[in-house]
Amino acid sequence: MKMTEYDPGHNTHKNGLSLHISGLLDSNGHELRATVSQSRLLAGYENFLCHAIERITIKHRPIEPDTPIRYSYWATRGALAADGYLYFHEPVPACPTFGLEEQSGVDACVTYWEEQHATCRSVQAVFSPP
């Protein structure tokens, strides 16, 4: 699913391996931005952001700075940047606790997100994160 198909009121901006969303300022207080290190992760990242938009606009659960978004074994959180965007980062995969060692971007988060979707599809189950 593409972001424009999901919610045409929000704009997706791609710049290489970076993706950011505009149009969430009123409902979330911040716009969202993150990067991945490989182009193969961009589609999964776009789907993950669809989940973030749903969480913010439909479930009325804003994404606050430095508050982790978790589901099972993946987690990410946004740090407030000087430009007002929440820039997502995640624990280094071998170190799953925030604050110990972190890396910018959402490679592990998107990889786990895609793996969970694939597992659910293989058993014909619905993947529905909180």
Image: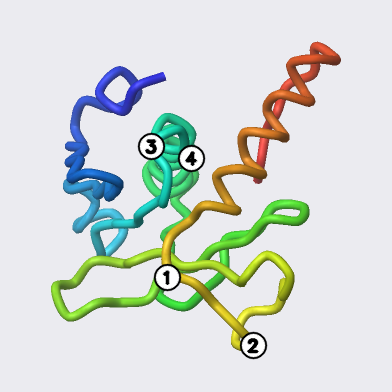
Residue at x-position 20% and y-position 40%: 14
Task: Decide which of 72, 41 is in the foreground and name it.
Answer: 41
Tag nearer the camera, 3 or 4:
3
- Residue 22, image x, y percentages: 18, 48
Distance in Å between CA atoms under marks 3 and 4: 15 Å
Q: Nearer the viewer, residue 128 or 93?
A: 93
Tell me: 48 left or right of 93. Answer: left
Q: Which mark is residue 39?
A: 3
Disc 4 marks which amino acid? Answer: Phe
Q: Name the residue located 72 percent from the left edge and 75 percent from the top edge.
A: 95
**Label 2: which residue?**
100
Amino acid, disc 2: Leu
Q: Earlier in the sequence, mark 1 or mark 2?
A: 1
Q: Nearer the viewer, mark 2 or mark 3?
A: 3
Residue 33's label in the rendered image is none
Identity of the amino acid at label 3?
Ser
Label 2: few (<14), some or many (≥20) within 10 Å? Answer: few
Task: For marks 4 and 2, give the CA distance.
Answer: 24 Å
Residue occupied by mark 4: 48
